[in-house]
Amino acid sequence: GDDIVRDLRDHAITGLAGVPTVWAILTRAAPLLAKTPLPQLRYITNSGGRVPQETVRALREKLPDTKIYLMYGLTEAFRSTFLPPEEIDRRPTSIGKAIPECEIFIVTAEGQRAKPGEPGILVHRGPTVSLGYWNRPEDTAKVLRPHPFIPAERGGETVCYSGDLAVEDEDGFFSFVARNDAMIKSSGYRISPTEVEESLMSTGLFQQVAVIGLPDPFAGEKVHAVATAANENIDVSTALKKAAEMLAPFMIPRAIELVDRLPVTANGKVDYRALVRERTDNGAHG
């Protein structure tokens, strides 16, 4: 962690984009950051996944003169949204509005345009939408589809269905809910892993948290948390008690499993599929 701080200082870095793991390390495992002025660091932004609210708060505290641009994007459409730095304190969980020249909207499961507060699949329209996956026409057709509200006879166009659940507020700002295929279905409830992760991170006991659903013979799936600790003296039972104060009973993890590090994909995102696979293939359900 401190090595990153030294590089920022010694090379007079002016802008830094980082995956969530980088921000977790800087806020939880880089004591030098609080003692090292970085006046040249004009802005930072996220890539490869959202930044937990607790981590955003810590970054604001440790880098008071650096602008933070929270962004959302997907490989098939590059960047999609950004939150202006002046909105962070008011909307710390928001991914913002569409980047210039692009349009973002939400489509419900019924194929209608979502109303404010109504969750649905986030759709990206604009010049950054890719042409498709190389030699994978079936996969391409699932993600890159005709615009749902512009008929072909009126010159329709191709848009990108992200597969991410999101919601828009009354002011037109978007918030990420969860990957649609990552929603946990437990005892008849659909649970957002992101909401559970935010609650666990707010305890201050963890560096990173990933919440997954594991097979359960009674509930269908059970909520399971995999986390890296912020320090060596962590008390998991305390974290669960704090979570119980913030979450509905059906959302509370059955267990919090501590690991040294979370697996990541090639582009730096937490590898949720690997977390599930490792705990189901081996029969280690916790």
Image: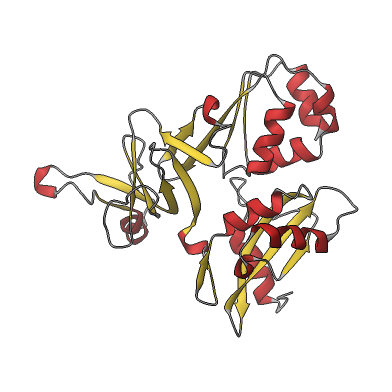
Estimate the x, y position of residue 235 in percent, counting from the top left. Answer: 86, 59
User: Which sits in the foreground, 54 or 70?
Assistant: 54
Write the residue at 39% across / 36% down: 171
Q: Residue at x 75, y 40 (%)?
A: 25
| Identity of the residue drawn at 71% across and 15% down | 12
Task: Specify the quadrant that holds the C terminus.
Answer: bottom right
Which quarter of the rendered picture does the N terminus lie within? top right
How many marks on residues? 0
- Coloration of the structure image: secondary structure
Picture coordinates of residue 250, whole percent (x, y): 60, 70
- In the image, residue 9 sits, relative to residue 57, either above or below, namely above
Residue projecting furthest to the front: 245
Q: Say above or below: 245 vs 20.
A: below
31 vs 75, left or right, is: right
| Residue 19 in the image, given as x and y percentages of width and height | 63, 40
Q: Is residue 58 above or below residue 143?
A: above
In the image, 29: left or right of 84? right
Q: Where does the image place residue 253, in percent across and percent down from the top left?
A: 68, 67
Q: Nearer the viewer, residue 128 or 103?
A: 103
With respect to residue 172, does 218 lie above or below? Answer: below
184 relative to 138 in the view: left or right: right
**Which residue lies most toward the bottom here?**
217
Q: Quadrant of residue 197?
A: bottom right
Q: Residue furthest right?
A: 233
The residue closer to the viewer here, 48 or 267, is: 48
**85 relative to 145 in the view: left or right:** right
Residue at image location 79% in from the left, 59% down from the top = 259
